[in-house]
Image (cartoon, rainbow, N blue to C red):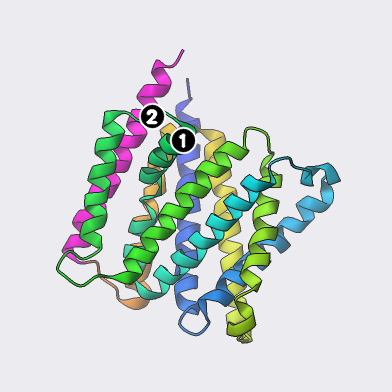
Amino acid sequence: MIKSQNVARGAFFIIASELSFAFSAAIIKLVSASLPNESIVFFRNLFGLVILTPLLLKSDIKILQTQRLHLHLLRSGVGIGAMYCFFYGLAHLSLGDSMLIKSTIPLIIPFISLIWLQENLSSRIMAAGGLGFIGVFLILNPDGDTNWASLIALSSSLMAAIAFVTVRKLSETEPPLRIVFYFGIVGLMISVIPLIWTWQTPTLNQYLMLMGIGLTTTIGQIFLTHGYQNAPASSVGIFTYTSVPFGTFLGWLFWNELLDNNSYFGGVLIILAGAIVLRTKIVQNQSDP
């Protein structure tokens, strides 16, 4: 049984990680006003790999040996695709709406797991998925005009869900550092290609913001790891939705952005659906022998 203080500590770290990710998203939105999306993705991967380098230097060379290169390439490809699409969404949507759409990832993962890993999908999770996507429909503006930025942001969630399931598959044999390294190096190789026709030399202020993205993202990943080390995802996963109010507040603070009624109602449905999924996982875990 999980001790209450461990769950509280885990929840604290999860909330802190989502606050860091919300700040990272705000910086991305800020710098995207003057720097191409392709450059932001490239520098995000570059600084991430720089931060990772000291850990690699301390490790044995065998950490890079793998028999599952195809899965590393798949994880890296869809992960970078998700990054491009999410950053595009941040540039063209309100910060609150971007974080709302990002929060659909936990709803998509069970369906990817069903198709790929043949994991069981209960009727409650299917109902929660339907409820969540009604929320997405409301955010996508059902009044008539198609919001392409929202659709691109939603495709980011789909690709991110595929990446998460791929990581789950890789974790059967691969250590975390190897998974992160291959994502970093392959991601950097992919993201350098568009710079051939989109390169724009960043100013000093832009470099500082790009480093800020790398720093806040890294801090968020560290906090997220600590959160799941202190308590299981079934206990603290719901706190990942705190990125929505954090993003909404930062969007209002820096850009005077306000969510419309459809976004508020859609957000409630998405968070409710996520809570149902997490609650279902808790029950399933308790019933497993």
Callout 1 crowding tier (Cα within 10 Å): few <14, some 14–19, many ≥20: many
User: Which amino acid type is marked by label 2?
Assistant: Lys
Looking at the rendering, which quadrant does residue 46 occupy?
bottom right
Q: Is residue 52 above or below residue 279?
A: below
Residue sitting at x 64%, y 73%: 193
Task: Say whether disc 1 or disc 2 marks the residue closer to the N-terminus.
Answer: 1
Q: Which of the numbered marks, if any, corresponds to residue 281?
A: 2
Residue sitting at x 70%, y 52%: 181
Is residue 2 among what the camera can see?
A: yes
**Position of residue 244 measured from the top left corner of the image (x, y, whole percent):** 35, 56
Q: Which region shows up in magenta? A: 260-289
Dot 1 and dot 2 residues touching (CB under 8 Å): yes
Q: Is residue 284 magenta?
A: yes
Relative side of 277 to 234, left or right:
left
Report the front residue among 77 and 99. Answer: 77
Closer to viewer: mark 1 or mark 2: 2
